[in-house]
Image (tube, rainbow, N blue to C red):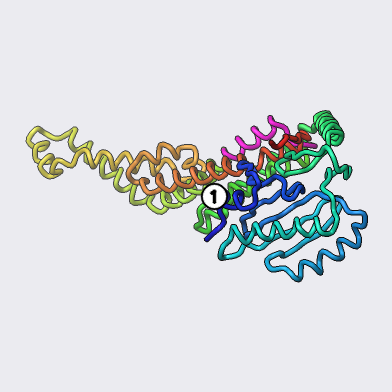
Amino acid sequence: MGFNYNKFAAATGLMLNRPNSLFYGSILGYPVYCKYITGRSTAMTVRVHAKTEDPIDFSGYLESWRQTQTGIVQISFNNHEMTAMLSIPAKNTNDVLSQQVYAIVNLLQQSGLRPCCMSCGRTDSWSNYLLDGEGCTLCSSCVMTTQENMAQIEAEKTAQPINPMGALIGIIIGAAVLGLMTFFVMKMGYITYLTGFLGAFITMLLIKKLGGRLTYASAIIGAVVCMLVAAATPAFELAGELAKYNQENKKTAQEYCDAYKDLQDTIVNATSEEKEELEKLLGGNTKQYKKRNEEYHVLLSNQTTWECFTNITTLCQYDLYSEVKGELIKCILWGVLSVIISTACMLPSMLKESYGKHSLTPLS
């Protein structure tokens, strides 16, 4: 049986803060915070806030105690906080994890540690809080101090000067990197969604680095420029392929257009009987011949990459380039969507850091 949020909460008696995947509450009077982590490896972190009169001796004892346990990968004690990492068992997952959490708390109780505020070590009047998505234990005095520090950090960050020219250079360099990566990746025959993720990240990082800090305006401009580049680069690369195709078929197209012109001249100068004979020879395919003539005229007038790029929407309307149209739409969608998704994932945290925004919320 795999890990189940509700069953683990029931087994430990902890409450679940679903948005942050955080279990919190009190076990044997100790403030406990558990977080189930998935990624390259799966584990659970356990944090308990308590104080001891001799933290050095207790820290040394912890490792020897851990070696007698099963499933506790790491454990440490520092600054009124004990942190442990638990491996996820394959069987009876929720029950085993809850037993390990209780074993850790029992150790604290038997060792004489007292639950406390994680900041000042005060053993009374502390409560559970959520600080930037992580559980913490604070007393009323430390709550006020933390809020004051948060306000001061935000004021300092907001007052920090911005270098518009540096931000602009960051956007230009980031967009150029995105364009070059997309171009060469397409040349190798791969889809471009990875370059969108990487290009957007590099752009935001350069804006922050060269501009002093990331602002809402610079972030929006950077994201829009990246989306434009993500759309224009595949179009330019495919325009190069179209130009190559047009050049290779230039002779055939010219011969066809010349023949079609001669035919039209013949029809214009022919008698009514000759026109009837010509229509029989054409077999009702006049519209098809005319359409092919238009396509070949477009081919002849778009012989360079730049000409194909500026007229790519017109070219894609013709059957001659129908396969390119589907490939172009796919590449543009992948590129633009990857930039949007990447930006949506990383911007909130980057903007919070740039503006010095922190959140402190009491946990009920």
Can you say whether 75 is above or below 10 in the image?
below
Task: Name the side, left or right, on which 300 lies relative to 281.
Answer: right
Q: Is residue 45 visible?
A: yes
Q: Nearer the viewer, residue 275 or 125?
A: 125
- Indicate the position of residue 118 as horizontal and vertical percent values: 83, 45
How many numbered circles are shown? 1
- Indicate the position of residue 264 as horizontal and vertical percent values: 22, 37
- Indicate the position of residue 64 as horizontal and vertical percent values: 81, 69
> Is 223 in the magenta?
yes
Q: Quadrant of the C terminus?
A: top right
> Is 238 in the magenta?
no
Q: Quarter of the image holding residue 173? A: top right
- Dominant SS type (magenta): helix
Can you say whether 223 is above or below 30 in the image?
above
Write the residue at 60% across / 64% down: 89
Q: Which residue is mark 1?
A: 193
Can you say whether 304 is above or below 361 in the image?
below
- Indicate the position of residue 36 as horizontal and vertical percent values: 64, 53
